[in-house]
Image (cartoon, rainbow, N blue to C red):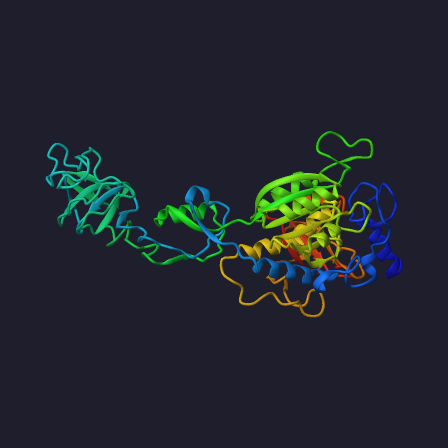
Amino acid sequence: MSGDELADALALADGRGGTRGTAHGDGRPGGRGPGPDPRESGPHGPQGSRDGARHRDWPAARAAAARAGAGRRSESTAVPLEEALGHRLAAPLTALTDLPAFDTSAMDGWAVSGPGPWEPLDPEDGTQDGASGTQDGASGTANGTAPGTRHGILAGDDRPAPLPDGHAVRIATGARIPPGTTAVLRSEYGEVRDRRLRANAAPQHGADIRPRGQECRAGDHLLPGGTPVTPAVLGLAAAAGWDELPVVRRPRAEVLVLGDELLASGLPSGGRVRDALGPMVGPWLTALGAEVTATRRLGDDAGALYAALEETTADLVVTTGGTASGPVDHVHPALRRLGAELLVDGVRVRPGHPMLLARLPSGAHLAGLPGNPLAAVSGLLTLAEPLLRAATAAEPPAGSPAEPPAGPFAGSSAGGDALPTAVLLGEVQGHPRDTRLVPVVQDGGGVRPLRFSGPAMLRGIAAATALAVVPPGGAATGAGVHLLRLPWA
């Protein structure tokens, strides 16, 4: 098969065929295909694109999306710890206290002073317990600032009495070390005989004592700004004294699902198909760091689409379907009517080449995704992901992401971000001119291409851990490829 024949075959597989009942002009199922994509005839998209937007190479499209996100950085806000999970730190996390805040016991046992053997003390009155010769008195301090118990010094007891040389007192893990302590003797290493605590071997000085500030000192930088707030980060922040965290506000996102052929429930019938993107795109945006305010189904209503874009209060609007030039593809006309600026109008990538990115007069951005499910995923990871990542970064980039060097994979980054690489464990046929994004799964030290990678298929991506970025011409077994990792993988 010649290169042109292969290109035509892949174009048909990508949803650009003009047969009714196979694909919308943007690759959306529903049967209104307009024939060959007119954007192939020139660099500026259908009917021309504003402000120099063009049918871009894939790395250049990601770079443009990253620049757009960096240009509208989200402001920071303080939220309670219990609400901070999933955000990003808006500033470096510093310690508000020493950790630990005082010398503490690392084990259950005895606080001892000197080389031993030791005389056990009642911690409440500082005298030997004559009944048993062991410390079995009340927990607390000599001045009564802690409650009395019969268990020695417990975690939470404040200001335990000084420990005289040659004496010992029972202590619990996490309890504050009394002044004069030279070591903690673990319970299993000592026993009381003849009213003396005796050890199998004398503990080294400082044994099993966590010294104040061992982990950090007040004012130390613990994590850089931009760090995702995970459960472990919440625990560290709480230990370091924080009640609220400064975080980057999540960009607000709205999803508009277009297409009269889509069913919200039930089985496909009467030429209509289930909407796979409505349930998928919102949660995917949430995983990318957005706050999704609504998912709305507008059908093929040009007026409803225009009104939704004109009235939106979101930072990012994501549409599904309607991005090509068919009779009911209303995204481009709505953008022209609004006076929006097209930043990316078509990308040389399969699947998903009719995707677009625009800036609305309100300042919001619109990411237009093709209607086929895997093509829409391609659009999410090509345009929405770098835009959201740049918008929620804590520190400004050193410079705006530059256009990539000649060739789609010169260097080790795409779209201004370094992408991981992996060895391909199976050959992937490429498009002669366009990048391909292919679902893959981690397999040992490499990644294996998955079946069911057509633009309308979700079976492959549902099992995948990443999308492999396959350059024009394809990639042989053993070749290194960049990876777009999925947010949950």
Image quarter for residue 266? Answer: top right
User: x%, y% of residue 213?
Assistant: 30, 55
Count of residue discs = 0
Task: Identify the residue at the far bottom of this view.
Answer: 406
Which residue does the image show at 74% across and 44% down from the upper left?
302
Which residue does the image show at 42% across and 44% down from the upper left?
81
* Nearer the observer, 365 or 134: 365
Is 422 situated left or right of 175 in this image? Answer: right
* Nearer the observer, 284 or 196: 284
Up-down: is 119 above or below 332? above
User: x%, y% of residue 4?
Assistant: 87, 60
Up-down: is 64 above or below 338? below
* Nearer the observer, 85 or 64: 64
* Nearer the observer, 130 or 147: 147
User: x%, y% of residue 450?
Assistant: 72, 47
- Examine the rendering and report whether any part of residue 251 can be seen: yes
- Examine the rendering and report whether any part of residue 488 can be seen: no
User: x%, y% of residue 122?
Assistant: 14, 38
Q: Quadrant of the N terminus?
A: bottom right
Up-down: is 382 above or below 139? below
